[in-house]
Image (tube, grey):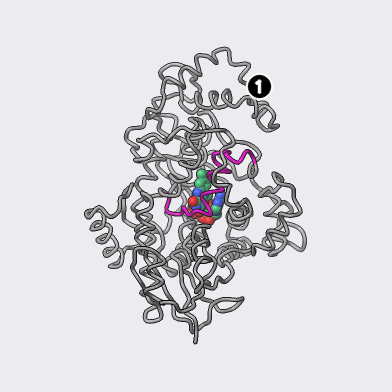
Amino acid sequence: AVRPHWLFGDQLGPHFIDHRHHGPDPRAPLIMIESWAVLRRRRFHRAKAHLLLSAMRHRAAELGDRVRYVRARTYREGLAEAAGREPVTVCRPTSRAALGLVESLAQVHVLPARGFLTPGDAFARWAEERAPGRMRMEDFYRWVRREHELLMDGDQPAGGRWNLDRENREPPPRGARTLGAPDPWRPEEDEIDDEVRHDLDRWEREGRVSFVGRDGPRCFPATRREALASLRHFIAHRLPWFGPYEDAMLAADPVLSHSLLSAPLNLGLLHPAECVDRAERAWRAGDAPLNSVEGFIRQIAGWREYIWHVYWWFGPDYRGHNALGHTQPLPRWFLDLDADAVTARCLRHALKQVRDTGWTHHIPRLMVLGSRALQDGWDPAAVTDWFHRCFVDGYDWVMLPNVVGMSQYADGGLMTTKPYTSGGAYIDRMSDLCGPCAYRPRDRTGERACPYTTGYWSFLHRHRGPLSGNHRMARAVRGLDRLADLPEVLATAQARGAAPP
Ligand code: FAD
């Protein structure tokens, strides 16, 4: 008999049921399980719960009679209801917890992971040739480009250079309120979204679940058709603008030219290969400049792929790393996404965007939200949990390395060469957020001292010892000695305590 195949909620694209390359039997009946325990376990952003349920239910509607869709308390109970003790297959799940569960169930046969460019064993061969702490993304990315002949001319990178970051770190155009790129693609809701919203309302009323953030209208693709429309629109209309302003922030244009593809990619609705191939074709057809295309391919074939592999490579203890010994709890206003309580304009805007959409681009995540947590010494595990719950694209595999490693430096430099944080001057250079702010980016003391500037110096001061041994931080640490007003700066930072800055 053909074994049924189980689809997790982030395995929604056609590649998860493609029988080639050790996939499930093409005639296999399918099982999907909506588990309340997952939603109850954490206080998720409501827009995230909405997107996930909407995407699962849309997929079930498409698959029709081929799928048995079960609503159950736990996965275990759902599987028993859908398949009894019958053997089933599943593609390798994306989190350690889910992998542990399926491996503990004797009836489940686990097939290889899908949805990435490089298999785990190929990454392992790459990583084994390198010492810990020397597994840099840049190096990995070049290896992927060669292996997949991505943006290559023979054995050389197209255009002669691997890295075009220097052209891709522009501040926003001076005086511009918006980038002027065409608007991003947005979906239209349908009756499945209405049904999801109705269920979420009911569950909240009954006290079964509790959410943060605002839900709706849905901003991200929930079906394969929507995901492809969104990808096509990005490549045709917005990719040319992507590169130069990748790191910029504008108050009135918070998406800039980012692709908004992380949610459909992480739901499995898109395969990364189709994203990078279409971008490369746009360049070869002369429709997008190399710096934008290389920047975009770097994000997907480099960063996304690298994060996926290091999540498994660094092992289960990675979650608990806390190299800087940070233990402060997250303040209430941050947990509740209470943007209106915040005065610092950059932080207020970022928190508001999280509250209203469950998404910001990478610089508000890294240099505003994450940097606040790092400077104030918040517990990195709690910060990871916050990002995981509040972002529509947050899953264990992608959050853990991005927050523990990239943003909080809690792994002591296994992933990055230095902690990512800055004073207000960086935010001022890369955005239009500081102009009307009540704080001044260059003020270190007094009422108008910028919390990022005071926070930056107090962070360096607190970790002066270990950071002075880091060649990328040594100069910044020496800068402390030139600050005649350091005691006042530290006192200013301390006086703010956990109050919203
Ligand atoms: P674009 O800027 O258009 O980039 C294109 C694609 O590249 C993204 O869709 C994404 O799939 C991929 N990508 C780029 N950088 C990364 C990265 N570091 N890790 C994984 N994929 C990457 N991304 C997530 O998908 N889920 C997360 O939970 C997540 N958490 C993050 C937390 C922090 C603290 C930081 C600094 C970054 C995090 N990122 C995460 C990476 C990045 O911020 C988002 O992928 C990106 O902002 C999503 O918007 P976009 O699709 O418009 O991306």
Viewer-nearest residue: 429 or 287: 429
Using the rendered view, name the quadrant where residue 343 is placed: top left
Residue beneath disc 1:
478
Q: Is 65 drawn above or below residue 334 in the view shown? A: below
User: What is the x, y in percent for residue 387?
Assistant: 45, 46
Mark 1: amino acid: Arg
Using the rendered view, name the quadrant where residue 227 is placed: bottom left
* Residue at the image position 69 percent from the left and 54 percent from the top: 140
Q: Is residue 478 left or right of residue 188?
A: right
Q: Quadrant of the C terminus?
A: top left
Range of the magenta residues?
A: 391-413
Q: Is residue 244 left or right of residue 38?
A: right
Viewer-nearest residue: 41 or 10: 41
Magenta run includes residue 392: yes
In this rendering, does residue 404 appear at all?
Answer: yes
In this rendering, does residue 362 appear at all?
Answer: no
* Residue at the image position 53 percent from the left and 66 percent from the top: 103
